[in-house]
Amino acid sequence: MTTNEVLESLCLFNEKAVEILDFSFTKSVRSEKTSFAGSMVRRDDGLFDVSSNRIGPSTEQVAAFCNNLRFFIQDNKSCSIRKLSEVYSHPSIPTDLRTEFEEVRANLNDFLNGVPNDFHLMKKGSPMSRWEMIETYVYGRVSAQTKMQDYRQLVSEKFSEDFVDFIFISLLSKLTIPIRRVLEVNNRALEFIGGIP
């Protein structure tokens, strides 16, 4: 990997990070409470009419966020978090910045591989990790739709679409923290190697 490729990857990450942190989705989850309310009313036939309401970012705001999030989670992007690990192994990057980046990455991976304590979505009888949840939502509801069947199964089994959206929006909003931290480390790396114009 050349120094120019290092600069390009860091700059692309930063460009996409600034965009995602400035999206109306990000502003919405920071300024408003994202919430869910649901109710059930028993009908004469013994079944229930279910109604629900989700407060928070719009479907379009969520889609825009998820489409840019893919730059950080898809390994075919030069600025994915995993690919940046290769960038940070370049000799032009100081060891302290490499260590700081790897710490952020390790914390993010620990978070993503964990199972949430506050709600459990199940897949094939096992609780889904946060990563499986994000992957199901991004690739089942928003883009590519390669996980559409998994997403539909979540919605049809037990939960309303509003509730599933609420869970995912809450989870997606937490990803802005490591994105912001990597942006800060990248800025220092770019400054060190002379990549900031």
Image: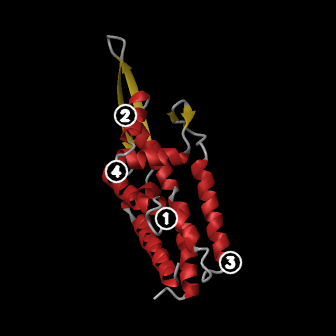
The residue that disc 1 covers is: 80
Badges 4 and 1: C-beta atoms under 8 Å apart? no
User: What SS does tag 4 mark?
Assistant: loop
Q: Residue 185: where, in percent of width, then height?
A: 58, 74
* Three-letter code, disc 4: Ala
Q: CA distance from mark 4 to mark 1?
A: 18 Å
Q: Which residue is drawn at the image coordinates 47% and 69% (left, top)?
A: 79
Q: Residue 91: where, in percent of width, then height?
A: 62, 81
User: What SS does tag 2 mark?
Assistant: strand
The residue that disc 2 covers is: 52
Q: In front of the other: label 2 or label 1?
A: 1
For label 2, the crowd category at 10 Å Cα-Cα, with few meaning under 14, some 14 to 19 and many 20 or more, is few
Query: Which comes sooner in the sequence, label 2 or label 4?
Result: 2
Q: Which residue is drawn at the image coordinates 51% and 31% (left, top)?
A: 124
Q: Which mark is residue 95?
A: 3
Q: CA distance from mark 2 to mark 3?
A: 51 Å
The residue that disc 4 covers is: 144
Q: Quadrant of residue 157?
A: top left
Answer above or below: position of 194 versus 61: below
Indicate left or right for 169 with 190 as reference. left
Query: Which comes sooner in the sequence, label 2 or label 3?
Result: 2
Residue farthest to the top, as pictured = 45
* Three-letter code, disc 2: Ser
